[in-house]
Amino acid sequence: MAEIFLKNAWYCAGWNHEFHQGAGAVIARKIAGERLVLYRTRTGHVVAFQDRCPHRQAALSLGRKEGDSLRCMYHGLKFNSEGICEEIPGQDNIPTDCRVRTYPVIEKNSWVWVWMGDPAQADPGLICFSVGPENPNWNMKISKMHVETNYLWEIENLADLSHIAWVHNDTVGGDLAFSRIKPKHTTTARGTHTSFWVYSHRPLGAIRHLFPEDARIDSNWEIDQTVPCNWNMRVRFFTPGTETEGPSNGELMADTWTCQSVTPCDDDSVDYYYSWGADNASEARMPGLSDLLGGTLDIAFNEDKVMLEAQHLRRKEMPDFKMTRILHDAGPSMILRVLNTLIKKENEIRPVLEPA
Ligand code: FES
Ligand SMILES: [Fe+2]
């Protein structure tokens, strides 16, 4: 598979606490096929460079922070926070083309976002909605994971939650009712919205012990998925009502958000940044709920990791294998269509944006 990514998009490079001002905090990332090095300056801004010294392509992530500058530790060239070379040891003349490509960076809701395309088109309004751990109304627990799979398989996984009935029986699933969900999918400007209710089902595996044995609940799932692979879901749990269509008439027990960003490193791996937590009222009703939900995602995403890594090996072995379609493929098809359309449009109109 050729590496094809949407370039004019914000990609999550990590949680902001990873980018501290310490001397050693020079962070290497691979995003959408490109190697980056990021560090936080003394003024508090995170800068992102191509992780490739213009001299002989040494890794700048092996470099050393000096004030707001970064020095390549191969032959000592030093670059300021705009990527411009300001020192070549042993040489007075600095060629004007001796500079490193830089990328726009924005921090929002404790996530660090990098724009991988044309800097002139870096619109902060395109950063996806999220509820961050700094939000005083919510108790978001954050984490991250590396998965050896293609990000398109992660998109499919997130766009079809019927799999929680099977992959996540003891964590974020727990009832075969999830394999019979009939979600309503609609397209949005840069993604999809998915909505469904599940009635009188067993509580999710990870929180079942908080309920009486044989307890049943209703739940509502509202999901916004945006390109490249951002996924935000509000899940609310209710006491079981009498409705079997539309909103439950049960009583709200817990209101939760989970915010997730999957960043493709290349065709074979992703960095996955995620959170889950309850609002203050829910946390007061069910103390410890947010910690439980946050910790559960680490376990649940390891369950996905096992499935997606094995699937990735097989899809690489037989890329032309004819796969069967089922009803649950509607959501994945819709979001992949949005992504494909944007990638196609970008490649038709954009000049080559790769650095010279
Ligand atoms: S490769 Fe960086 S200074 Fe030579
Ligand atoms: Fe999953």
Image (cartoon, grey):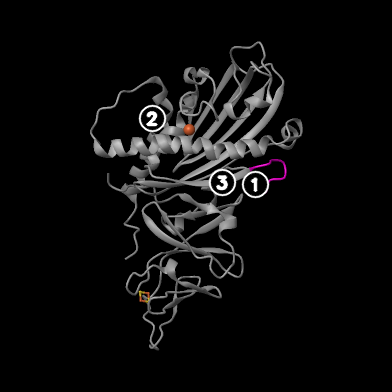
Foreground: 198 or 314?
A: 314
Q: Amino acid at mark 3?
A: Ser
Q: Position of residue 234 (x, y in %)?
A: 60, 32
Q: Position of residue 311 (x, y in %)?
A: 34, 35
Main SS category, magenta section: loop
Q: Is residue 3 above or below residue 327?
A: below
Q: Does mark 3's beta carbon lie closer than 8 Å to ligand 2?
A: no
> Does label 2 or label 1 sit earlier along the sequence?
1
Q: Is residue 285 above or below residue 147?
A: above
State the residue at coordinates (64%, 36%). 292
Q: Amino acid at mark 1?
A: Pro
State left or right for residue 196 relative to residue 324: right
**Structural distance between the alpha carbons of marks 3 and 1:** 11 Å
Local packing at callout 2 (Cα closer than 10 Å; few below 14, some 14-19, many 20+) is some
Magenta stretch encompasses residue 155: no
Which region shows up in magenta?
A: 132-140
**Structural distance between the alpha carbons of marks 2 and 1:** 31 Å
Residue 43, picture quadrant: bottom right
Residue 306, picture quadrant: top left
Q: Position of residue 105 (x, y in %)?
A: 52, 58
The residue singled out by tag 3 in the image is 143
Q: Position of residue 344 (x, y in %)?
A: 33, 43
**Secondary structure found at label 2:** helix
The residue singled out by tag 1 in the image is 133
The residue singled out by tag 2 in the image is 333
State the residue at coordinates (35%, 36%). 310
**Structural distance between the alpha carbons of marks 2 and 3:** 28 Å
Find out whether the residues at labels 2 and 1 contact each other: C-beta distance under 8 Å: no
State the residue at coordinates (41%, 69%). 100
* Marks 2, 3: nearer the viewer: 3
